[in-house]
Image: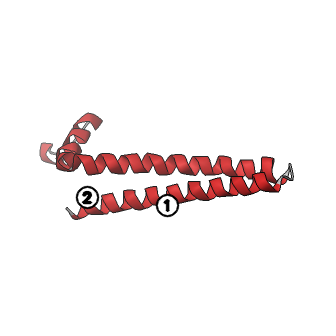
Amino acid sequence: MSEAHKPQHHNTRSILAWVSSFLKPYKNRVLAAVFFLFLGSLSWLALGQGVRLVVDEGFLSGNASELNQIVLVILAITFVSGIATFCRFYLMSCLVSA
């Protein structure tokens, strides 16, 4: 294989530096999208704990008022997750179109 056709091996740091040079003008949008990514991920993790609370505290204890409160918390977590997903998708769409 000739020198011109040899595959080039780049380390991760050089690739990240190359990508970040393109993203630098959009730093705030990228950081906001990463924030909403983490917020959405954390809300999905919290949703699993909410379902656990529904089963453990709501159904097994037979307390209807506590079950209602837990369901409202689950709905709030789902709402936060939806808003985070929308914001992340919107920011990334704006970034791609720019």
Residues under labels 2 and 1: Cα distance? 20 Å
Q: Residues within 10 Å of mark 2 (few under 14, many from 20)?
A: some
Image coords of residue 18 (percent x, y): 19, 43
Question: At x 63% / y 53%, what residue is drawn?
Answer: 73
For marks 2 and 1 on the same chain, the one whose residue lies earlier in the sequence: 1
Image coords of residue 77 (percent x, y): 57, 54
| Left or right: 44 as drawn, with respect to 34 | right
> Label 2: which residue?
95
Question: At x 64% / y 55%, what residue is drawn?
Answer: 74
Q: Nearer the viewer, residue 30 or 71?
A: 71
| Left or right: 71 as drawn, with respect to 88 | right
| Left or right: 18 as drawn, with respect to 42 | left
Image coords of residue 14 (percent x, y): 22, 37
| Left or right: 22 as drawn, with respect to 90 | left
Question: At x 37% / y 47%, what residue is drawn?
Answer: 34
The reply to whether residue 7 is in sight is no
Where is 96 relative to 25, above or below?
below
Q: Amino acid at mark 2?
A: Leu
Q: Amino acid at mark 1?
A: Gly
Residue 82: mark = 1
Q: Secondary structure at mark 2?
A: helix
Image coords of residue 84 (percent x, y): 44, 55
The reply to whether residue 78 is in sight is yes
Q: Where the C terminus falls, by quadrant?
A: bottom left
Q: Secondary structure at mark 1?
A: helix
Question: At x 34% / y 62%, what residue is drawn?
Answer: 90
Q: Residues within 10 Å of mark 1 (few under 14, many from 20)?
A: some
Where is 34 relative to 78, above or below?
above
Q: Nearer the viewer, residue 37 or 1?
A: 37
The nearer-to-camera label among 2 and 1 is: 1
- Name the residue at the front extreme: 65
- Name the residue at the left extreme: 4
